[in-house]
Image (cartoon, grey):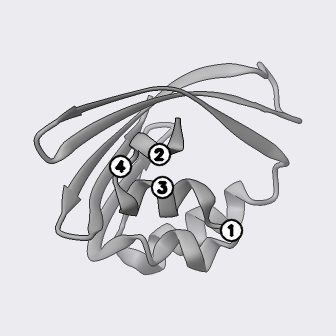
Amino acid sequence: MTDTLPTPIADYFSADTPEGIAKCFTQDGIAVDERNTHRGRDEILKWREEVGKISFSHEILSVRRDGNRVTVATRVSGNFKGSPVDLDNVFDLEGDLISRLEIS
């Protein structure tokens, strides 16, 4: 299903380092996860470093695009309470980068 993802989102899901993920965002990008808002690449990098301490994997279930907004439904499995969990990842794109991501 990753072949239907816009490039910046495919890069986000395939990145294997927090740095690689942070580079998918605009300089002033925003990521919202677990009701916490991370603003700018530096905060996004720190967020992903913390998330990276948990072993998990994504399975992409569906992709829906409406203009520059792309919703990617995923099943996340790993060594965390409540695994597996289905999440919506709502991306706003700005050019070749992600300007906002909200995970719910």
Q: CA distance from mark 2 to mark 4?
A: 20 Å
Quarter holding the C terminus is top left
Instruction: Tell me the number on the disc at residue 27.
Output: none
Locate residue 45 relative to residue 65 in the image: left or right. right
Of callouts 1 and 4, the N-terminal one: 1
- Marks 2 and 1 sit apart, C-alpha to C-alpha, by 27 Å
In the rendered image, the residue lying farthest to the front is 3
Question: Hey, what amino acid is under mark 1?
Answer: Glu
Q: Which mark is residue 3?
A: 2
Q: Amino acid at mark 2?
A: Asp
Relative image position of residue 6 (x, y in whole percent): 34, 53
Which one is in front in this view, the residue at disc 1 or the one at disc 4? 4
Q: Nearer the viewer, residue 51 or 69?
A: 69
Q: CA distance from mark 1 to mark 4?
A: 17 Å
Position of 54 with respect to 71 (left or right) is right
In the rendered image, which residue does mark 4 sit on?
Answer: 101
Residue lying furthest left in this view?
67
Of 39 and 17, nearer the camera is: 17
Q: Is residue 62 above or below residue 54?
A: above
Element under disc 3: helix
The alpha-carbon separation of the residues under discs 1 and 3 comes to 19 Å
Q: Image height check: is 33 above or below 11? A: above
Q: Can you tell which of label 4 and label 3 is closer to the viewer?
A: 3
In the picture of the structure, the residue carrying the numbered disc 1 is 49
- Classed neighbour count for the residue bearing mark 3: other residues with Cα under 10 Å, few (<14), some (14–19), many (≥20): some
Residue 36 in view of the camera: no
Tag 3: residue type?
A: Ala
* Secondary structure at numbered mark 4: strand
The image shows residue 35, relative to residue 18, as above or below, that is: above
